[in-house]
Amino acid sequence: MAATTDIPRFVSTPTGFLLVLRQGDDAFAALERLTSDHAIPAASFMGFGFAGEVTFGFFDAESRQYQPRTFHDVELASMTGSLAWKDGRPSIHAHGVAGRKDFAAVGGHLLGLKVGTGSLEITVIVHDQRLERATDAAVGANVLQLPEHRPG
Protein backbone atom coordinates (compact mmCIF):
# COMPACT_ATOMS: atom_id res chain seq x y z
CA MET A 1 0.00 0.00 0.00
CA ALA A 2 1.30 3.47 -0.86
CA ALA A 3 1.95 6.01 1.85
CA THR A 4 -0.77 8.58 2.46
CA THR A 5 0.70 12.00 1.77
CA ASP A 6 -2.16 14.30 2.76
CA ILE A 7 -1.60 14.13 6.53
CA PRO A 8 1.19 15.77 8.57
CA ARG A 9 4.19 13.58 9.35
CA PHE A 10 5.82 15.66 12.11
CA VAL A 11 5.43 18.46 14.63
CA SER A 12 8.06 20.55 16.40
CA THR A 13 8.61 19.93 20.11
CA PRO A 14 10.63 21.89 22.69
CA THR A 15 13.56 19.48 22.18
CA GLY A 16 13.20 18.65 18.49
CA PHE A 17 10.49 16.83 16.57
CA LEU A 18 7.87 14.10 16.84
CA LEU A 19 7.30 12.10 13.67
CA VAL A 20 4.26 9.90 13.09
CA LEU A 21 4.86 7.93 9.93
CA ARG A 22 2.16 5.92 8.17
CA GLN A 23 1.89 2.69 6.23
CA GLY A 24 4.28 2.63 3.28
CA ASP A 25 6.51 5.46 4.54
CA ASP A 26 10.27 4.87 4.43
CA ALA A 27 11.50 5.80 7.93
CA PHE A 28 15.10 6.46 6.87
CA ALA A 29 14.03 8.69 3.96
CA ALA A 30 11.77 10.65 6.34
CA LEU A 31 14.60 11.13 8.86
CA GLU A 32 17.04 12.19 6.12
CA ARG A 33 14.51 14.67 4.71
CA LEU A 34 13.78 16.11 8.17
CA THR A 35 17.51 16.48 8.88
CA SER A 36 18.16 18.25 5.57
CA ASP A 37 15.03 20.42 5.46
CA HIS A 38 15.51 21.68 9.03
CA ALA A 39 19.32 21.83 8.97
CA ILE A 40 19.51 19.64 12.07
CA PRO A 41 23.15 19.75 13.25
CA ALA A 42 22.88 16.33 14.95
CA ALA A 43 20.27 14.43 16.91
CA SER A 44 19.40 11.32 18.86
CA PHE A 45 16.16 9.48 18.16
CA MET A 46 14.00 6.69 19.48
CA GLY A 47 10.92 5.05 18.07
CA PHE A 48 8.46 2.18 17.98
CA GLY A 49 5.54 0.96 15.92
CA PHE A 50 4.60 -1.30 13.04
CA ALA A 51 7.11 -2.36 10.39
CA GLY A 52 5.87 -3.74 7.11
CA GLU A 53 9.47 -4.45 6.16
CA VAL A 54 12.58 -4.12 8.30
CA THR A 55 16.11 -5.11 7.38
CA PHE A 56 18.55 -5.76 10.20
CA GLY A 57 22.25 -6.28 9.73
CA PHE A 58 24.92 -7.95 11.80
CA PHE A 59 28.36 -6.41 11.25
CA ASP A 60 30.97 -9.06 10.47
CA ALA A 61 34.22 -7.51 11.68
CA GLU A 62 36.33 -9.91 9.63
CA SER A 63 34.67 -9.18 6.27
CA ARG A 64 33.76 -5.61 7.32
CA GLN A 65 30.31 -6.10 5.85
CA TYR A 66 26.79 -6.32 7.22
CA GLN A 67 25.02 -9.66 6.97
CA PRO A 68 21.45 -8.48 6.23
CA ARG A 69 18.19 -10.21 7.03
CA THR A 70 14.74 -8.84 6.18
CA PHE A 71 11.54 -9.44 8.14
CA HIS A 72 7.95 -8.54 7.23
CA ASP A 73 4.97 -7.48 9.32
CA VAL A 74 6.65 -7.18 12.71
CA GLU A 75 6.24 -4.81 15.65
CA LEU A 76 9.24 -2.58 16.17
CA ALA A 77 9.46 -2.76 19.96
CA SER A 78 12.40 -0.41 20.20
CA MET A 79 14.56 1.68 17.89
CA THR A 80 17.34 4.02 18.91
CA GLY A 81 19.85 5.93 16.87
CA SER A 82 21.66 9.10 15.95
CA LEU A 83 21.58 11.59 13.10
CA ALA A 84 24.80 13.22 11.93
CA TRP A 85 26.44 14.20 8.63
CA LYS A 86 28.85 12.47 6.25
CA ASP A 87 30.10 13.99 3.01
CA GLY A 88 27.48 16.75 3.17
CA ARG A 89 24.52 14.38 3.54
CA PRO A 90 22.52 13.17 6.55
CA SER A 91 23.94 9.98 8.07
CA ILE A 92 21.76 7.65 10.14
CA HIS A 93 23.02 5.08 12.63
CA ALA A 94 20.23 3.01 14.16
CA HIS A 95 19.66 -0.25 16.00
CA GLY A 96 16.40 -1.92 16.87
CA VAL A 97 14.49 -4.91 18.14
CA ALA A 98 11.30 -6.24 16.59
CA GLY A 99 8.80 -8.84 17.72
CA ARG A 100 7.35 -11.43 15.37
CA LYS A 101 3.85 -12.86 15.69
CA ASP A 102 5.31 -15.97 17.38
CA PHE A 103 6.74 -13.55 20.02
CA ALA A 104 10.33 -14.24 18.96
CA ALA A 105 12.53 -11.14 18.96
CA VAL A 106 14.92 -10.19 16.17
CA GLY A 107 17.21 -7.21 16.02
CA GLY A 108 20.46 -5.55 15.18
CA HIS A 109 21.76 -2.66 13.12
CA LEU A 110 18.87 -1.17 11.12
CA LEU A 111 19.60 -1.08 7.39
CA GLY A 112 16.07 -0.28 6.19
CA LEU A 113 12.61 0.30 7.62
CA LYS A 114 9.23 0.72 5.93
CA VAL A 115 6.13 1.34 8.02
CA GLY A 116 3.48 -1.36 8.11
CA THR A 117 -0.20 -1.29 9.06
CA GLY A 118 -0.71 1.43 11.63
CA SER A 119 2.06 3.89 12.35
CA LEU A 120 5.63 4.38 13.50
CA GLU A 121 6.36 7.08 16.10
CA ILE A 122 9.84 8.63 16.26
CA THR A 123 10.99 11.22 18.81
CA VAL A 124 13.96 13.27 17.59
CA ILE A 125 16.05 15.17 20.16
CA VAL A 126 18.15 17.82 18.41
CA HIS A 127 21.72 18.59 19.55
CA ASP A 128 23.21 22.06 19.15
CA GLN A 129 26.57 21.05 17.62
CA ARG A 130 26.97 19.66 14.13
CA LEU A 131 28.43 16.16 14.26
CA GLU A 132 30.08 14.27 11.42
CA ARG A 133 30.72 10.60 10.77
CA ALA A 134 33.98 9.37 9.29
CA THR A 135 35.15 5.95 8.24
CA ASP A 136 37.41 4.45 10.89
CA ALA A 137 40.03 2.44 8.99
CA ALA A 138 40.72 0.19 11.99
CA VAL A 139 37.07 -0.88 12.20
CA GLY A 140 35.97 -0.46 8.60
CA ALA A 141 32.81 1.34 9.63
CA ASN A 142 31.50 4.87 9.98
CA VAL A 143 32.09 6.29 13.45
CA LEU A 144 30.61 9.43 15.00
CA GLN A 145 33.28 12.11 15.47
CA LEU A 146 33.01 14.25 18.59
CA PRO A 147 34.30 17.82 18.47
CA GLU A 148 37.61 18.50 20.15
CA HIS A 149 37.14 19.89 23.65
CA ARG A 150 39.17 22.97 24.43
CA PRO A 151 39.11 24.07 28.07
CA GLY A 152 38.32 27.63 28.28
Image (spheres, rainbow, N blue to C red):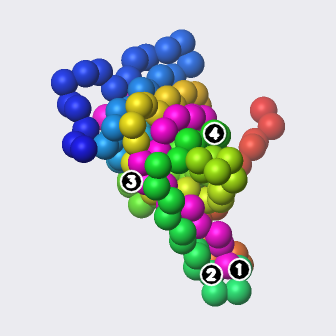
Looking at the image, is mark 3 or mark 1 earlier in the sequence? Answer: 1
Is disc 3 surrounded by few (<14), some (14 to 19) or many (20+) residues within 10 Å? few
Residue extent of the magenta highlight: 36-60
Quadrant in the rendering for residue 58? bottom right
Whole-percent x and y of residue 118?
A: 41, 31
Residue at the disc numbered 3: 89
Amino acid carrying mark 1 in the image: Ala
Gap between marks 2 and 1, in whole Å?
Answer: 5 Å
Gap between marks 1 and 4, in whole Å?
Answer: 27 Å
Answer yes or no: is residue 41 visible.
no
Q: Which residue is drawn at 64% across and 87% down?
A: 63
Amino acid carrying mark 3 in the image: Arg
Report helix, strand or loop for mark 3.
Answer: strand
Looking at the image, is mark 2 or mark 4 earlier in the sequence? Answer: 2
Looking at the image, is mark 4 or mark 3 earlier in the sequence? Answer: 4
Residue at the disc numbered 2: 64
Q: In this view, does 90 lie to the left or right of 141?
A: left
Gap between marks 2 and 3, in whole Å?
Answer: 22 Å
Quarter of the image where the N terminus is located? top left
Q: Residue at x 68, y 47 (%)?
A: 103
Q: Residue at x 66, y 56 (%)?
A: 106
Gap between marks 3 and 1, in whole Å?
Answer: 25 Å
Answer yes or no: is residue 103 visible.
yes
Q: Mark 3 or mark 1, which is nearer to you?
A: 1
Q: Mark 4 or mark 3, which is nearer to you?
A: 4
Amino acid carrying mark 4 in the image: Ala
Amino acid carrying mark 2 in the image: Arg
Residue at the disc numbered 4: 77
Gap between marks 2 and 4, in whole Å?
Answer: 28 Å
Do labels 2 and 1 touch, CB within 8 Å? yes
Q: Mark 1 or mark 4, which is nearer to you?
A: 4
